[in-house]
Amino acid sequence: MEGTDEIVSSALSPAGPQAETIARLWWWMLGISGAVFLVVFALLVAALYLRRTNGRQAPPGGESVFILVGGVLVPLVILSGLLVYMIVSTARLVPEDADLTIQVRGYMWWWDVYYPDADVRIANELYLPVSSDARIELSSADVIHSFWVPSLAGKTDAIPGHTTIHWLRAERAGTYRGICAEFCGLQHANMSFRVVALPAEEFAAWLAERKEAIRARAAGGTENAHELFVRANCDSCHTVRGTSAAGTVGPDLTHVGSRLTLGSGTVPNNLGNLAGWIANPQAIKPGNLMPRAYLSPSELQRLTNYLATLR
Ligand code: CUA
């Protein structure tokens, strides 16, 4: 499933009830405003034509009636109808109960994703069981970001010092693209993420695998390559659960090997890009907080291979 599926990213291709409600509202608004545009355009053409052939001619019922009906009554009916429809639709966007809670924190320029019940932390990816209402508790570590998965729901701002609630529900399994929808600095455009919706049992297995990986790592003792991780100072910013590394400045690397992308959607996650990122992260994503690691080619290779095993 990982990385192979087509990635859906369109508010007009909804895969959940919230995005469907929003898309339906959008289609109604497009249809109605399209019809209004055609009527106004037809009236304009008629006015030009009548003026040319018959000189000045009052519309049926007189000018003031025409203005009252066409300029006040009709817009009032259409806009009030849309307003009521919009209020009813928006009220339906919030489900009554959450099936699971996920905490998402925006950073310049990546996303921390934490499952409090399972105590699992990943970055820039959000795994979900299909047909479940996920309550997303959104916060920000620095500036205002905005969390948006166009195929699943509307956008919600992530605000420093405040928790906002966002709801996600996917009715179809698949990979959906999410983006930061609020300008937040140099790499705002490279602050995307993936939402992976899995059938319920696959999601449970995915969570269990992550927990088992941490347990096995803690039981297995420190690998040689992890000493390299510490020597290169990676541990002052990054956490690898099950080892001594517990930095909190950068993304948690406990499961970095299973990530679909690096740099929050900047490049695909493979050995070449991973080595390139460690050797010169500023070349791939200028302005991010990570300094380059000065390693010999063989050390770089060992460190890259080690990180790829963290799944
Ligand atoms: Cu974060 Cu734009």
Image (tube, rainbow, N blue to C red):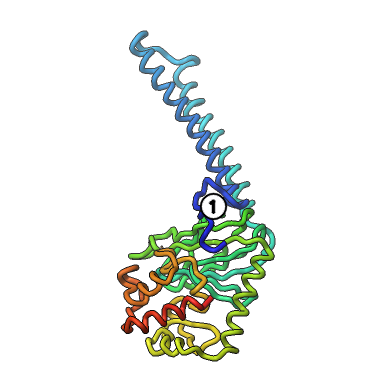
* Residue placed under numbered mark 1 in the picture: 151
Residue 139 picture location, percent across and down:
50, 70
Decide which of 134, 258 is in the foreground and name it.
258
Question: Assess mark 1: CB under 8 A from ligand 1?
Answer: no
In this rendering, is residue 21 above or below 298?
Answer: above
In this rendering, is residue 102 above or below 24?
Answer: below
| Tag count | 1
The amino acid on which the numbered mark 1 sits, given as a three-letter code, is Ser
**Residue in the image at 45% along x and 30% along y:** 37
Residue 306 picture location, percent across and down:
46, 81
Give left or right: position of 298 versus 194: left
**Residue in the image at 35% along x and 72% along y:** 276
Residue 162 visible (yes or no)? no
Residue extending furthest top? 54
User: In the picture, which quadrant includes the C terminus?
Assistant: bottom right
Residue 300 picture location, percent across and down:
37, 81
* Neighbours of disc 1 within 10 Å: few (<14), some (14-19), many (20+): many
In this rendering, is residue 32 above or below 163?
Answer: above
SS for dot 1: loop
Residue 93 visible (yes or no)? yes
**Residue in the image at 30% along x and 70% along y:** 283
**Residue in the image at 58% along x and 82% along y:** 214
User: In the picture, which quadrant includes the N terminus?
Assistant: bottom right
Residue 301 picture location, percent across and down:
39, 79
Give left or right: position of 23 versus 43: right
Decide which of 5, 55 is in the foreground and name it.
5
Residue extending furthest front? 298
